[in-house]
Amino acid sequence: MSFVIDPPRQPGVAVAGTNARFPVRRIFCVGRNYADHVREMGNDPKSEPPIFFTKPADAVVESGAAIAYPPLTANLHHEVELVVAVGKGGAGIQAAAALDYVWGYAVGVDLTRRDLQNNAKKAGQPWDAAKGFDQSAPVGALMPAGKIGHPRRGRIWLSVNGGAKQDADIADMIWSVPEIIAALSRSWALRPGDLIFTGTPAGVGPLVAGDAVACGVEGLPELGFSIVRDG
Ligand code: MN
């Protein structure tokens, strides 16, 4: 069997402490999962079940990347998030068993064209252009759960050019990792290689060309990247 064009390269992310890589199948993201961020976006934290959206697998970029400022926006935003890597497939997973499906954890940034997202919300249109653009998913090196367990609390932070922008604790998530996996797997059968971005705390804000971003979750390798002028 041969393909009529060259098949796409398999997207992947680094695994801390090894040359082996984790293959990325799909990227799911949770919206509105920290009460302070839900409030800063003008919504009520307790009013809705988790909402999910996706990014293409090849939107992933690794630590150290120079990310081109994306087209069609004048308001690119950072959202630092705990990222869950799924190692075992399943559907209708119970929260009590959900951590068995987790291979590891990383820190990621859900880059967002906020102006396009605000326009889409007003017009009742989908978020794909706001969330799923090229290079919109920087992810740091993965730590295997077999090494560090399953973090339930710990500082999550992001700085731009050394200035603190986001600083919170993953214990403040409205829906925990097991609850997210349970809810997500009712809608999609999860597969090995899926990544789940678990939502961002307050302090989201703009990035411009020339900015250097650093971010982390306690116990996980830091993620750093820069924004460069397109073209
Ligand atoms: Mn997000």
Image (cartoon, rainbow, N blue to C red):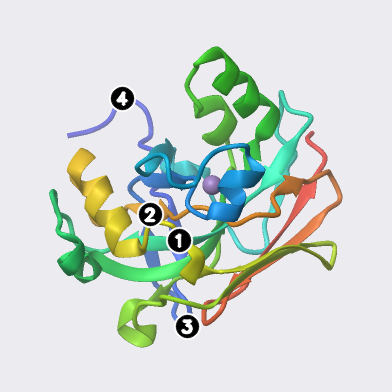
- Quick one: label 3 or label 4, which is nearer the N terminus? 4
Separation of marks 2 and 1 at Cα, in angstroms: 7 Å
The relative height of residue 92 versus residue 122 in the rendered view (above or below) is: below
| Amino acid type at mark 4 | Val
- In the picture, the quarter occupied by the N terminus is top left
Tell me the CA gap for discs 1 and 3: 18 Å
Query: For this rendering, which residue is in front, 13 or 149?
Result: 149
Q: Which numbered disc flags the more N-terminal residue, 1 or 3? A: 3
Label 2 or label 3, whichever lies nearer to me, is: 2
**Disc 4 secondary structure class:** loop
**Nearer-the-camera pick, 204 or 76:** 204
Circles 4 and 1: CB distance less than 8 Å? no
- Seen at 76% across and 34% down, the residue is 75
Q: Name the residue under label 2.
A: 195
The answer, for residue 188, to whether it is visible in the render is no
User: What whole-number distance in Å separates the C-alpha atoms at marks 2 and 3?
Assistant: 20 Å
- According to the picture, the residue beneath numbered tag 3 turns out to be 17
Q: Mark 2 falls on what kind of element?
A: strand
Residue under numbered circle 4: 4
Q: Is residue 218 left or right of residue 105?
A: right
Which kind of residue does numbered mark 3 sit on? Gly
Task: Give the mark nearest the N terminus, 2 or 1.
Answer: 1
What whole-number distance in Å separates the C-alpha atoms at marks 4 and 1? 35 Å
193 relative to 212 in the view: left or right: left
- Choose the circle earlier in sequence order: 2 or 4: 4
Checking the image for residue 1, the label placed there is none
Tell me the element at label 1: strand
Counting from the top left corner in percent of width and height, residue 96 is at 17, 68
Q: Do the residues labelled 2 and 1 touch (CB within 8 Å)?
A: yes
* Residue neighbourhood size for the residue with mark 1, other residues' Cα within 10 Å, grouped as few (<14), some (14–19), many (≥20): many
Residue tagged by mark 1? 83
Amino acid at circle 1: Val
